[in-house]
Amino acid sequence: MKLRTSATISTKTKLSQTLRGWLPILQSDLESLKETLDEASKDNPFIQVQSGSEVNSHSKISKQPHYQKNSVSNEIEALTTSKKSLYDLLYEQIEAPLFPTQKSVAIAGEIIKNINDNGYFEGSLSEIAKILETTTTEVEKVRLRFAYLEPSGVGAIDLYESFLFQLNDFDLDDDIYKFCQTIIKDFENLQAYQDRPNFFQSIKIIRKFKNPPALEFKSEVAQIIPDIFINTINGEIKVSLNNSYYPEIIVDTGGVDSKFEFVKEKLKDARSLVDALALRKETLTKIALMIVEYQYDFFTGGEIKPMKLDDLAGELDRHHSTISRAISNKYLSCERGVFPIKGFFATALDSDSETSNATIKSYIKEIIKQEDRKKPLSDNKILDLIQDKFNIKLGRRTITKYRIAQNISSSSDRKKQYALGV
């Protein structure tokens, strides 16, 4: 007797039971899905998990440090990664003595999910605390332990904290160490320390720091396996899953009489596993369809519009944390590039605005990238440019907040960094 993944889920109750029992299957990224299924079925002699087609040209996308224009209708060469990714390296280090408890390991795992390609933490302490039912203080305590992980500086919230993390790698006299700390914490007033005896020695040390902390990983071409493809065919947007890379679950009793209680129990577990895999596909398909509905303008060349995770959770009748897990570490490939699914969730700047904070943040990053290094843009000047372009009202503090959220220093600090070559 054989049972394949075409099995359907009949009732909402069954869906809920399956989701609670096999949540790791929903949460796993596509590359590690087979491993998750193998772990879930290791005690079931009637289950065989077969790998998907890992050589299909549409299954893997190469991801450069920035999103690149691509067309999923063309053949894409499947790439392999000869070097561990930043995230592989971090997960390997989440163990005792730095992370001695299951709780600290779980928190560290969520923190890693919110570390960007540069190595900076860009998540919300309160959001992680909400997901894991703990406190922001506890999450922050775990995050600060990343100061002792490799690559040095990873997990910091900005350039200066990254420098403080990296300072621990140098075997320095106490006086030099403390003076370096002082300079880093008061980098805005760098000129005030130029006459101090240890100034030039300290600056020499600081110039050895990596910026960003994950710089060595950015030069590598990382492999991305998107869960979802979105194509425009004859003017119509089509959504499809990356089915060619999905594992297949085969249940075979090998002729053993299914009337035995042991066999019945194992077959029940097997069907639940099949249902859980089907639920993952169904949930991600629904999420993709809703993203297309909410963000239609983006897929036709426009900007990302305001969209909240709670909106999606409400539409799908799922808990906020379930949707958060469902989109974690998952990617979407469309004609504009390859994007993390969580990047499509942006907040409106005001109740009447169709311009999202993601659009403004992207614009800030772009104009700073092109600024005159001898005369960096102040937050007030950035505000003027944004108001002229988008015709919206914002405060300077909002611009400052968005700038800091992207680990971009102030204009005076950027001027000093440009001068130092940092």
Image (cartoon, rainbow, N blue to C red):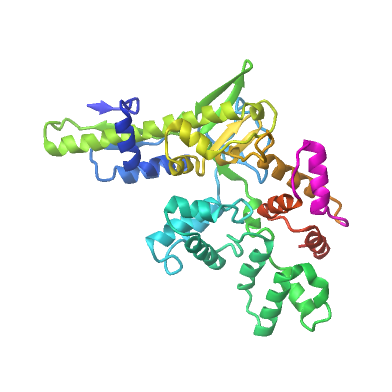
Could you tell me which residue is drawn at 39 percent across and 41 percent down? 25
Q: Tally the marks.
A: 0
Looking at this view, name the residue that lies furthest to the top: 234
Could you tell me which residue is drawn at 35 percent across and 25 percent down? 6
Could you tell me which residue is drawn at 76 percent across and 58 percent down? 410
- Observer able to see residue 84: no
Q: Position of residue 290 (x, y in %)?
A: 53, 29
Relative horizontal placement of residue 93, taking residue 372 as reference (left or right): left
Relative horizontal placement of residue 203, taking residue 253 as reference (left or right): right
Relative horizontal placement of residue 108, taking residue 358 as reference (left or right): left
Query: In which quarter of the view is residue 414 placed?
Result: bottom right
- In the rendered image, the quadrant that contains the C terminus is bottom right
Q: Position of residue 16 (x, y in %)?
A: 33, 36
Q: Is residue 276 above or below residue 209?
A: above
Q: Is residue 36 above or below residue 315?
A: below
Q: Position of residue 5 (x, y in %)?
A: 34, 28
Could you tell me which residue is drawn at 15 percent across and 39 percent down? 262
- In the rendered image, the quadrant that contains the N terminus is top left
Q: Is residue 320 above or below residue 397?
A: above
Which residues are the magenta region? 374-395
> Residue 307 magenta-drawn?
no
